[in-house]
Image (spheres, rainbow, N blue to C red):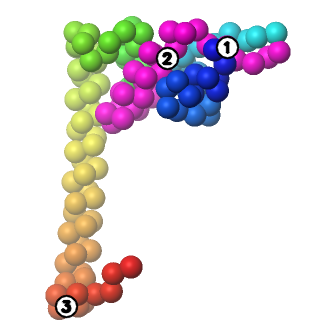
């Protein structure tokens, strides 16, 4: 299938697919006209990549899961390396959430001090 067909079948964009290919997560052949042509199994692989990205992993993190991207990633037994990557990513996300919560609390306190708790304009 061509890149547009794969994008449509997986709910992603051709640009994202090219990015996944550049990252070494998917591969294609070139047709005689130079178009990228993907194997039908790429649909499962791209859907798994998107699931892992949606869970908060990065493309670099997803590389750890290459051996199981063509099957049911969720049903595959977890590897020590996969668990370690997921735990590290969770710690990063927790730190980011904590930093954002602190920033929100500082802004809320500043607004409270500035307005004396009276409601301000809402855009």
Residue 79's x, y, as percent? 24, 11
- Give the quarter of the image for residue 61: top left
Residue ID at (29%, 25%): 85
Is residue 25 one of those drawn in magenta?
A: no
Residue underneath mark 1: 37
Residue underneath mark 2: 43
Query: N-terminal of the two: label 3 or label 2?
Result: 2
Query: N-terminal of the two: label 2 or label 1?
Result: 1
Is residue 18 something one can see in this rendering? no
Query: N-terminal of the two: label 3 or label 1?
Result: 1
47 and 97: which one is in front? 47
Q: Nearer the viewer, mark 3 or mark 1?
A: 1
Q: Secondary structure at mark 1?
A: strand
Residue 105's x, y, as percent? 20, 69
Is residue 51 one of those drawn in magenta?
A: yes
Residue ID at (27%, 58%): 100
Task: Give me the C-alpha separation between circle 2 and circle 1.
Answer: 12 Å
Residue underneath mark 3: 118
Residue 45's x, y, as percent? 45, 16
Q: Which residues are magenta?
A: 33-60
Q: Residue furthest left?
A: 117
């Amino acid at each position: 299938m061509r890149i547009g067909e794969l994008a449509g079948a997986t709910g992603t964009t051709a640009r994202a697919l090219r990015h996944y290919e550049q990252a070494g997560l998917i591969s294609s052949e070139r047709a005689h006209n130079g178009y990228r042509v993907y194997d039908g199994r790429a649909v499962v692989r791209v859907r798994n990549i998107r699931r892992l990205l949606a869970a908060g992993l990065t493309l670099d993190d997803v590389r750890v899961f290459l051996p199981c991207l063509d099957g049911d990633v969720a049903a595959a037994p977890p590897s020590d390396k996969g668990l370690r990557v997921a735990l590290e990513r969770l710690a990063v996300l927790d730190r980011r959430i904590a930093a954002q919560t602190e920033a929100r609390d500082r802004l809320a306190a500043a607004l409270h001090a500035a307005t004396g708790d009276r409601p301000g304009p809402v855009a």
